[in-house]
Each structure stands twice: as structure tokens, then as C-alpha cells.
């Protein structure tokens, strides 16, 4: 199990200079990758993204790649632009009767008169070298996500133990519900009828109807099954966050039904505590890949 939060950094020498990669991630419903790349390597962004997808399945990633130590190419005079500029200036002088001589600074103020030599094209070997540095950073990021995931898994299992214990307690408290409900109902009816005879068959029929309407056995059984499935899913590899989220929704639904049907103050207190643990799991679960 992995968290979606982490950081990884790696450096390595290439033909173009020292490559430095920093990768940060946080929680997100899907996989969202954003690169900040120098212009010289922007053309290989799709290949870099594919390398990331081999390791990271879900999360919001921000990856910065910098290249240090590259030598800037010397500017090159664009002779054709200079010639056209000279013709334009001479034409303007003639048009407006300007006597001033043409000087070098008139050319230097024009942005496009010098061009920078285009950087060498990236070769297949260059791409491999850059991807190696990226992969090391992504692996460190993934290791950080795994370590955080282990902590979250430990917390989940401890909370599941509490939830399971609360479920058992509720089941025990509910075990003698029919007998208790019958006794209470009989007592209330006796007070109303005083010395009149009570129809025992009718009494137990009403008690049975009351029990059926407030029976929580099925909900407790399903809740226990969801807890078991949640534990089992925690052991799975890959992206499990969405499956765990679905199971948690089902557990919350069963707990809510138990609280509504129980009509018992003591059991209500236990379900409040149970749902509190489920909420704590939900908060942490948003960060699971």
C-alpha cells in the first residue's frame, strides 16, 4: 500500500551537463503529471511521462528537471537581417532628409540581428541518460510513498481492530434483546391493564414484530464481512485507494443502519464511537494510491 504524498530527488551527468530532477506528489483522484523542463529537452516530455507512469499509478505529480553546466552557444550575426536593416535605414534617411551617419549601435538595438545557435539535437543516448536520472528520482519518490503507506496501513489495522471489537460488543448487547423487549412490553401493558388478563401469545407476537423491525443481525454480519475484505485489500499491490473507499462507504452505511434500528441508548453510544473510527480512516484514506 502506498501513500500519494512523497518527494524524490536525483542528479546525474550527461553530455548536455548535470541533470537534476526533483519530483513531488500529493493526493489526487487520478494520475496528473506536470513537468517543468528546460527548452532543450521539452521535446521528450511524452517519453518522460511514460517513464513515470511505469511506477506511479495515481496522484498529482510536479516534476522539475534542470540542466547545469551547459555552455551557452555564442550569438551569430544574421547577415541577411543586417542587410535588410541597412536598406531600411538608408531609405528612411532619404525619405526624411536625415543627415546623420549610420553607426553600429543602430544595428545593436535590433533584437533579431543576432541569433543563438540551436542546441545539439537530443540523441537516443541522451534521452536514455536523462530518463535514468528521472527514474532514480521517481524511485525515491515511490519509496517515500511506500514508507508513508506502511504507517497508514498500521493505523488502519489498529482502527479496524477497534471497529471489530465494537461490533462484537454491540452483538453481545443485542443478544438478549427479544427477551428484554418482551419483559418491558409486558410490564408496560400490565400497568395499563392492571389486573386484567394478558394474552401471552399476543404479547410475544407483538414482541416478535418489534424485534424484527429493529433486528440488526444482518447489518452486523455485513459490517464484519466488510472489515475482513478491507483487511484483505490492504495486502494487495497496486492502486487500492478507490476500492478501500468503496468498502468504507459500505461500512458507514451498515453502521448508520445499526444506529437507526437499534433504538437503544447504550448501543447508540457504541455506534457513535464506531463511526468516529470510520471517519478517521476516511480522512487518511484520501491519501492512498
Image (cartoon, rainbow, N blue to C red):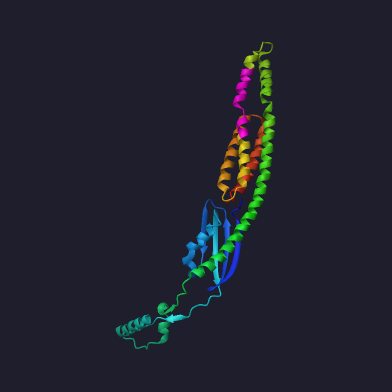
Is 64 on the left or on the right of 224, as rendered?
left
Residue 240: x and y in percent read 57, 48
Q: Is residue 267 magenta?
A: no
* Quadrant assignment, res 114: bottom left
Residue drawn at the location 61% of the way across and 41% of the way down: 229
Q: Main secondary structure of the magenta part?
A: helix
Residue drawn at the location 57% of the way across and 68% of the way down: 20
Is 70 on the left or on the right of 151, as rendered?
left
Residue 125: x and y in percent read 51, 70
Residue 216 in sight in this render? no
Residue drawn at the location 69% of the way across and 30% of the way down: 173
Between 127 and 16, the one lying in front of the other is 127
Which span is picked out in magenta?
204-221
Q: Is residue 65 above or below residue 226?
A: below
Q: Is residue 191 above or below residue 143?
A: above
Q: Is residue 210 magenta?
A: yes
Amino acid at each position: 500500500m502506498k501513500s500519494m504524498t512523497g518527494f524524490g530527488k536525483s542528479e546525474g551527468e550527461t553530455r548536455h551537463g548535470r541533470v537534476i530532477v526533483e519530483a513531488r506528489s500529493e493526493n489526487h483522484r487520478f494520475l496528473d503529471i506536470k513537468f517543468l523542463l528546460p527548452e532543450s529537452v521539452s521535446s521528450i516530455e511524452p517519453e518522460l511521462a511514460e517513464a513515470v507512469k511505469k511506477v506511479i499509478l495515481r496522484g498529482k505529480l510536479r516534476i522539475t528537471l534542470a540542466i547545469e553546466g551547459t555552455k551557452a552557444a555564442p550569438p551569430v550575426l544574421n547577415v541577411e537581417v543586417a542587410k535588410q536593416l541597412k536598406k531600411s535605414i538608408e531609405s528612411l534617411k532619404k525619405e526624411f532628409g536625415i543627415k546623420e551617419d549610420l553607426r553600429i549601435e543602430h544595428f545593436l538595438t535590433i533584437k533579431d540581428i543576432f541569433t543563438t545557435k540551436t542546441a545539439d539535437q537530443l540523441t537516443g543516448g541522451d534521452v536514455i541518460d536523462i530518463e535514468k536520472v528521472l527514474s532514480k528520482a521517481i524511485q525515491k519518490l515511490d519509496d517515500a510513498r511506500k514508507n508513508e503507506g506502511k504507517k497508514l496501513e498500521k493505523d488502519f489495522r489498529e482502527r479496524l481492530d477497534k471497529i471489530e471489537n465494537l461490533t462484537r460488543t454491540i452483538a453481545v448487547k443485542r443478544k438478549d434483546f427479544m427477551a428484554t423487549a418482551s419483559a418491558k412490553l409486558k410490564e408496560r401493558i400490565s400497568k395499563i391493564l392492571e389486573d386484567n388478563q394478558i394474552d401471552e401469545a399476543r404479547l410475544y407476537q407483538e414482541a416478535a414484530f418489534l424485534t424484527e423491525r429493529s433486528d440488526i443481525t444482518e447489518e452486523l454480519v455485513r459490517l464484519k464481512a466488510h472489515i475482513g475484505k478491507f483487511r484483505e485489500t490492504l495486502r494487495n499491490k497496486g492502486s487500492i485507494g478507490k476500492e478501500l473507499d468503496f468498502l468504507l462507504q459500505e461500512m458507514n452505511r451498515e453502521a448508520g443502519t445499526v444506529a437507526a434500528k437499534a433504538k437503544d441508548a447504550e448501543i447508540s453510544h457504541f455506534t457513535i464511537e464506531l463511526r468516529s473510527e470510520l471517519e478517521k480512516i476516511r480522512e487518511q484514506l484520501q491519501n492512498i494510491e
